[in-house]
Image (spheres, rainbow, N blue to C red):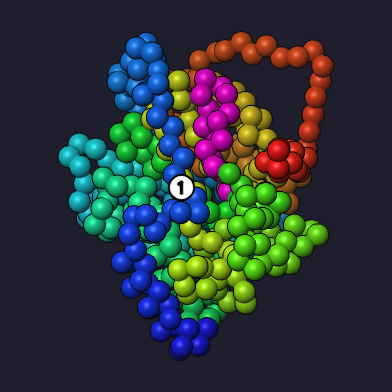
Amino acid sequence: MCVEDSDKAAQSMEQLSLRTDSDIGISSPLESICENTVSKDSKQNQFVNFVPTIRSGEWSHIGGREYMEDTHVCIADLAKKFGSHSVEGEAVSFYGVFDGHGGKGAAHFVCDNLPRVIAEDADFPLALEKVVTRSFMQTDVQFAQKCSLQSSLSSGTTALTAMIFGRSLLVANAGDCRAVLSRLGMAIEMSKDHRPCCVKERKRVESLGAYIDGDDYLNGQLGVTRALGDWHIEGMKEFSDRGGPLSAEPELKMITLSKEDEFLIIGSDGIWDVFSSQNAVDFVRRRLQEHNDVKACCRELVEEAIRRDATDNLTALIVCFQADLPVQITVHRSRVRRSISAEGLQSLRCLLEEQ
């Protein structure tokens, strides 16, 4: 990236800081699940009386790749770590998985800087949705500036973060990492995979003059449509309000946690190449019922992915909301055995989006 590009990056950073709330999130408005506004009194009590007991674990492995480009972060109290302002008695926990491509520079830069950018925002922590969206985009521009000075860092990364503030869970995703919530054993997907085969993403990138090739690659080069970094790839990013086809803007989803919510699995796409969302929830529940060790459960999930011939880097991060074991439940399954590959499931999702 030349000096002129660096100047543009600085200008873009300044413009970004002046953008209004309505300017951010236009392409991916926050999906908010206001469960406690539509529930009966008995259901409301699950929210009012529930206080999450947070514990987490993580594990990663190079998998079948030559280099490890995944990284992750777990921060119990974001405000305390960065000396930022906080709401009395309410910690904001932060968890993130970053799956790099074309090198590890972007993944490590975002992992090291995004939490700080969020914590230092003037609206943190009372306007988390706005803060998180703005911070993803600011961190992306900061990485562009860094690459203009150190071109060896040029690379890209997907990013998925989860923040817990009281009973609120906010997931932000740009890329194909995935977060899945277990609600009494039922898998609730908290993020969507941003892949070129998805109709909504295809329409967005094509409206910006980009294309998806026959192998479902953005401009014939990337297997994702949202990511931070990749400023070195021509035609992917622009220093303008319009932006390029490869967007750093995350999609957000927020819920209010209840006593039915057991744990959240955050995994890089290598995990989801060999696990469906429900399959991963079933696997984790069984292991937690056996030993209730969150870190050991992450290791076992990664090891099982390797046994299933996963070929990518592998990172699994689990956040539990309960101290107790997941309750035993009876699942009524069909007598007809059905199976579908992870690739087939992704294709089915894309086809359903077209309907």
- Give left or right: position of 185 versus 10: right
Which segment did they paint magenta? 177-191
Q: Determine the residue positioned at 45% across, 20% down.
A: 260
**What is the secondary structure assignment of the residue under circle 1?**
loop
Tell me if 191 is positioned left or right of 279 in this view.
Answer: left
Q: Position of residue 326 (x, y in %)?
A: 50, 20
Q: Position of residue 264 (x, y in %)?
A: 49, 34
Residue 166 x/y as whole percent: 30, 34
213 left or right of 140 in image: right
Q: Residue placed at 68% from the left, 11% from the top? A: 332
Circle 1: is it few (<14), some (14-19), or many (20+) Cα within 10 Å? some
Rendered view: 332 above or below 9: above
Residue occupying image coordinates x 35% and y 28%: 52
Q: Residue at x 41, y 71 (%)?
A: 142
In the displayed image of the protein, which residue is found farthest to the bottom?
3
**Residue 81: in sight, yes or no?**
no
Indicate whether residue 181 is drawn in magenta.
yes
Magenta segment, prevailing SS (helix, strand or loop): strand
